[in-house]
Image (spheres, rainbow, N blue to C red):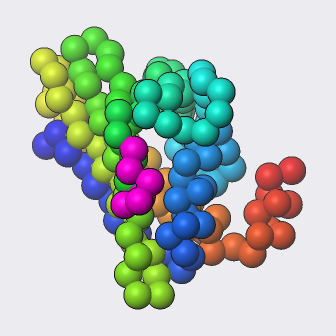
Amino acid sequence: MSDFRHVVEIQASPARIWSVLLDVEHWPEWTTSVAKVHRMDIGPLTLGSRTRVWQPKLAPAVWCVTSLDQKRRIFAWTTRNLGVKIVARHQVDAIGNLSRVTFSLHYSGVLGAILARIYRDLNRDYLSREANGLRSYCEAPVAQQRAAAR
């Protein structure tokens, strides 16, 4: 299995969730799957933007935004290392009064299937942490989010 996916429903507007997702420098505030983030470019996240991400149990990785559709609220970024390409995709959809967010990972390349299998449990854990962390953060009152950021 080289594909992983986690879907979560969040009681917040798609616009709110989308703005939190695109603010990648602040991901460590809402997910324990990301320890540190450093944007390598200035300005908003755009096609070609690069970000170094540190995650527990993994080597730091540089992720490059390879697709970004503001209207449909979808972005994907890609990292490559040792014959493996990993694409992480994030999508926010309006579902009635809720938003549905889909996080997915796709491994490819010479060693893609092997590494996907080795990191299967970690991938599932991190996608779950990201989805649940985003839900908790976006559903919390704004004052609570600001206090947590301090």
Which region shows up in magenta?
A: 68-73
The answer to whether residue 61 of the structure is visible from this angle is yes
Q: Is residue 137 above or below residue 12?
A: above
The quarter holding residue 38 reads top right
Q: How many marks?
A: 0
Q: Is residue 73 left or right of residue 56?
A: left
Q: Is residue 126 left or right of residue 35?
A: left
Quarter of the image that includes the N terminus? top left
What is the x, y in percent for residue 98? 46, 82
Q: Is residue 133 magenta?
A: no
Q: Which residue ends up furthest to the front in the rendered image?
A: 71
What is the x, y in percent for residue 149? 80, 52
What is the x, y in percent for residue 42? 65, 27
Depth order, front residue of 137/21:
21
Q: Is residue 111 above or below residue 136?
A: above
The answer to whether residue 129 of the structure is visible from this angle is no
Q: Is residue 134 left or right of residue 106?
A: right
Q: Main secondary structure of the magenta part?
A: loop
The residue at the point 22 percent across, 33 percent down is 107
Q: Is residue 103 above or below residue 59?
A: below
Q: Which residue ends up furthest to the top in the rendered image?
A: 82
What is the x, y in percent for residue 6? 33, 59
The residue at the point 23 percent across, 40 percent down is 106
The residue at the point 40 percent across, 87 percent down is 96
The quarter holding residue 82 reads top left
The residue at the point 61 percent across, 39 percent down is 44
Depth order, front residue of 41/104:
41
